[in-house]
Image: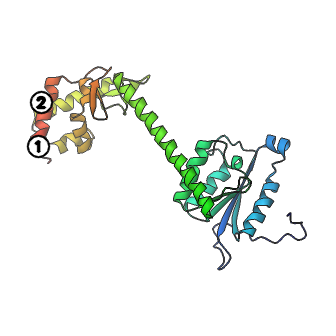
Amino acid sequence: MTLSAQNEPKIAVLSGNQPAQPGGGPRAAIYVRVSTEEQAQHGFSLKGQEEALKNYCLALGYQIFKIYKDEGKSAKDLKHRPAMQEMLQDAEQQAFSAIFIYKLDRFSRSLKDLILTIEKLKEWQVDFVSLQDRIETASASGKLMFHIISAFAEFERNIIGERTSFGMERKTMEGGIVTKPPFGYKMNNKKLEIDLEKSSQLAEIIKQFLGTDISLNKLAKKFDLSVNGLKKILANQTYLGQVKFAGETRAGSHQALISKETFKQIQDKLGSKWTIQ
């Protein structure tokens, strides 16, 4: 049943972070979006979405915290929608307990963005309600749908993780490196190359480490490094022309900076009772 303008109840709209009045019901955010083309072709006006969502919020006993509007914005991504970003920041701060949208494609047309964003809302304990799609997370059936969406989010993350892991493993099998370049190297066209300036500093670090009694602390300070950073440099097998991933070491496609004999001497000294002074 449609409410006429004359009989339409008044709706309380809270501004900013104004707290809800006692007994006034939970706070809700309304999000509306339309692109110029959509409004012209399909009549998805901001005003139409807004009025329908106001009435729906009122029927469910919510107070409206704020209405977030993105006019003339594409649904391709979330990052370039100012009102969307503002609403998500407020959601993280738990400024309201539910987000109401007119239809899922008003929120996002990317399934990945939709799933991952709803997963964040779950972490922030903010409900999600889509009027036209009959999706909400306040009831038992709605929570079930929310869990299904969350399961898809976990599935999406696992797929991304597997693809990333597979890509990294394949790259190491081909001799490539999957971490940032170690001290003494640089990346050029996704390949590891020797950095002449830093590699000469590396040679000096090794020379002083093996040839003097300087402490790790003093040696690190001398080359503007942390002690842990220095230890990682001295123990890094990348300098042997090797790459390591998931506990396996393979021959790399880059040029070695340290010989096996020198590397063994470094490890022997690191493994001894070397004091940090």
Picture quadrant of residue 265: top left
Q: Please state the total of marks drawn on the protein image.
A: 2
Q: Nearer the viewer, residue 23 or 137?
A: 137
Q: Secondary structure at mark 2?
A: helix
Q: Can the viewer see residue 233?
A: yes
Give the percent coordinates (x, y) of residue 256: 25, 22
Image coordinates for residue 209, horizontal then vertical, percent? 15, 34
The residue nearer to you, when weighing 217 against 13, is 13
Q: Residue at the location (67% across, 65% down)?
A: 28
Image height of 21 relative to 274, above or below: below
Relative placement, left or right, of 102 versus 197 is: right
Q: Amino acid at mark 2?
A: Gln
Tell me the residue that label 1 is attached to: 274
Residue 205 at x, y = what percent? 20, 32
Circle 1: is it few (<14), some (14-19), or many (20+) Cα within 10 Å?
few
| Crowd around label 2: few <14 · some 14–19 · many ≥20 (10 Å) | few
Residue 269, compared with residue 31, is above or below; it is above
In 3D space, how far apart are the residues under numbered discs 2 and 1 (Cα atoms)? 13 Å
Residue 212 as seen in the image, left or right of residue 85:
left
Residue 84 sits above or below residue 155 on the image: below
Q: Residue furthest bottom?
A: 22
Percent coordinates x, y for residue 170 in the rendering = 39, 26
The residue at the point 46 percent across, 34 percent down is 163
Amino acid type of the residue tagged 1 in the rendering:
Trp
Judge left or right: residue 66 versus residue 147. Answer: right
Residue in the picture at 55% in, 55% down: 147
Residue ID for mark 2:
265
